[in-house]
Image: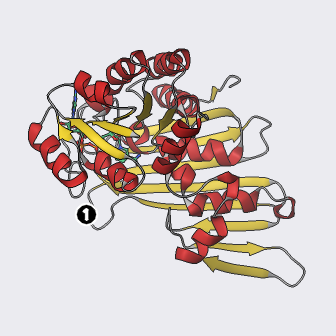
Amino acid sequence: MHVGFLGCGLIARAHARNLSGVAEIVACFDTDFRRSSAFAEDHGGNAVGSIDDVIDRSDAVYVCTWTSVHPELVGAAAAAGKAIFCEKPLAVDLSSATTMAAVVGKAGVVNQVGLVLRHSPAFRWVRHQMNRPAAGPLMSIVFRDDQYLPIQGLYGSTWRIDSARAGAGTLLEHSIHDLDLLRWMMGPIGAVGARTANHHGHDGIEDQAVVWLTTRDGSATATLTSIWHDLLDRPSQRRVEVFCRDAYFAIEGDWHGPVQWERNTTDGESGSLSGQELADAAAGLDGRGANPDAEFIDAIRSGQPSYPDFAVALEAHRLCDAAYRSAADGGSPVAIGPE
Ligand SMILES: NC(=O)c1ccc[n+]([C@@H]2O[C@H](COP(=O)([O-])OP(=O)(O)OC[C@H]3O[C@@H](n4cnc5c(N)ncnc54)[C@H](O)[C@@H]3O)[C@@H](O)[C@H]2O)c1
């Protein structure tokens, strides 16, 4: 299985590490040649001179550039009939994301998106537990996601404060993960409302978003608070609390835990899981493991659909677009049509 990379920055390297021993990286291209040559040196393959060269040499293409370029590169890989892994968000706006989902669907290529937290042991375990009848019905989720403005520290990218390349700020660029997770945990969403604010003053880049989401039957409501601050000791941090009628779950570390729980049994029950114990408890839940890249390659080899795919990402884009429309209208509810 020959894999090529378009864009050789931070997230490309994370995927390359996951692909080690799973598939062979044969080619990469970055408009910054220093990045592609360093990537090839570390992860294998050749730093080639064009997008087409990467696509020609590869069975599967990773699209890991900044967001505004994703549609063009996905279109080129789909036209060549290659399997595609595209980073989230798919695009800077809903209409481009809708076109991209249609393009890969029409091309019939295996496709996956970087909504990687759907493979997280912490989220998979809690979702499994909250859906058990003993937990009772879901009532509410309190979801907080904060990190420093990601033009500094680990991210060190300037494009994240350029709305032409990033599309928008913390909600689209980062918390599209969280909107996707909330829809996955809650089921189909019926309405969304949001307020956003901009404390850093970068045009079109909100650094604060507070969103509420209600299930279609109105029985459960979640809030999401997404913040980009300047606390350099706080890289991506999530804390999620799930309230069911008969159970409570808290996720502190979004991959390895800890996750904590309390249950309303006759003698009371509470506990905590993290690290290897959590990974073991989550193994195989939903039929998946914790390496999204290995599953992408497996799907190509077996000719099966991959997960999560562009159709899943499109639903997160619809929620994100609705939240921005609500915020532009002072926070009024926006109904979400059928999926
Ligand atoms: N799934 C996740 O958790 C996650 C985490 C971080 C980033 N991302 C997403 O991944 C994408 C990249 O983010 P990053 O942090 O790796 O950014 P980055 O700045 O580290 O890397 C992006 C690279 O794309 C290159 N590039 C730009 N235009 C190009 C083109 N036309 N052809 C080839 N290369 C081009 C840039 O030179 C740069 O090296 C973004 O869409 C981002 O939202 C996802």
Return the residue nearer the eye: 169 or 193: 169
The C terminus appears in which quarter of the rendering?
A: top right
Return the residue nearer the eye: 216 or 105: 105
Q: Is any part of residue 18 visible from this angle?
A: yes
- Is 84 on the left or on the right of 242, as rendered? left
Number of numbered discs on residues: 1
At x 26%, y 29%, the residue is 54
User: Are there few (<14), some (14-19), or many (20+) residues within 10 Å of tag 1?
Assistant: few
Query: Where ligand 1 lies, by image quadrant?
Result: top left
Q: Is residue 171 above or below residue 250?
A: above
Farthest residue toward the left?
34
Q: Is mark 1 within 8 Å of ligand 1?
A: no
Residue ID for mark 1 = 232
- Give residue 240's quadrant in the image: bottom right
Return the residue nearer the eye: 51 or 282: 51
Q: Is residue 203 above or below residue 293?
A: above
Q: Is residue 151 above or below residue 310?
A: below
Residue 139 in picture, x, y percent from top left? 75, 54
Residue 82 in picture, x, y percent from top left? 42, 26
- Give residue 128's quadrant in the image: bottom right
At x 53%, y 33%, the residue is 313
Residue 157 in picture, x, y percent from top left? 20, 45
Farthest residue toward the right?
266
Q: How is the image coloured?
A: secondary structure
Q: Is residue 323 above or below residue 8?
A: above
At x 58%, y 35%, the residue is 193
Farthest residue toward the bottom?
267
The N terminus appears in which quarter of the rendering?
A: top left
- Is 179 on the left or on the right of 146, as rendered? right
Q: Is any part of residue 64 visible from this angle?
A: no
